[in-house]
Amino acid sequence: MRVIILAGGRASRMGREKAIIELSNGIRLLDLIVSRVMESKADEFEVAVTKNTPETYLYCQEQNYRTIETPGCGYHADLRYLLDLYPVFITVACDIPFLQAEHIDALIAFYSGNSVTGAVPLSIVPDGVTPGFAFSYKGERLVACGLNVVTNSQYSVPFVFHDPMLAINVNTPADLRVAMRYLNGNEL
């Protein structure tokens, strides 16, 4: 299964390209995600960049990360562009610092032909974390976590991860502070 790391967003709430934000341990967000993808059962990966992320593109070139340029006209437009190239792939947001190879492997094992939305129960989202896109499924409130299987199928099913750390997406400076506290081993 191919993984595409999404690193082409405008990052308007962060004021800088998220993928290349350096964490306290000296590693960049993108490097952390790449290492998790490489530890997983994924066959290959590419980093999706856009005209919005020129520094990320240059960084990928320096690191020899294979890139693919998408139109940069929004999440759904970029996914449609990628679906014209690949019939099925996993997307991983570049801003989920607590992603583990096991999360990717679980999604690969669960995939059965339909699109899959990785999610975390809203009830276990850590304090101080602003949940992203929330939705209901079978009476439970879930939060999309930035890890999905994308296909042309009209149907999408959620895969629920019971890992509260996967709910931490770095979308704002406040989210980055929360992530840094956890990365440094501090309790909130």
Image (tube, rainbow, N blue to C red):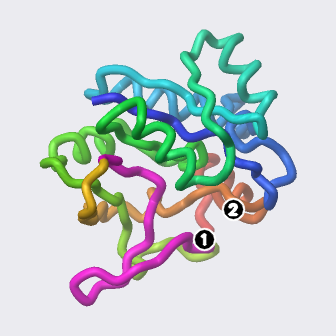
SS for callout 2: helix
Task: Indicate the quadrant where residue 120 lies.
Answer: bottom left
Mark drawn on residue 83: none
Residue 11 locus on image (x, y percent): 76, 52
Percent x, y of residue 102: 29, 41
Q: Is residue 48 left or right of residue 161?
A: right
Residue that sits furthest to the right in the current view: 15
- Vertical order, 89 against 131 (above or below): above
Which corner quadrant holds the C terminus? bottom right
The answer to whether residue 132 is magenta is yes
Q: Is residue 112 above or below residue 25?
A: below
**Residue 41 to residue 176: above or below:** above
In the picture of the structure, the residue carrying the numbered disc 1 is 129
Which residue is drawn at the image coordinates 59% and 64% (left, top)? Answer: 187
| Residue 181 lies in quadrant | bottom right
Three-letter amino acid code of the residue under disc 1: Val
Q: Amino acid at mark 2?
A: Asp
Q: How many discs appear? A: 2
User: Which tag, 2 or 1, sits closer to the chain's start?
Assistant: 1
Which residue appears at 54% of the width and 49% of the height?
96
Circle 2 residue: 175
Task: Write the start and end of the magenta stretch as one range.
Answer: 130-151
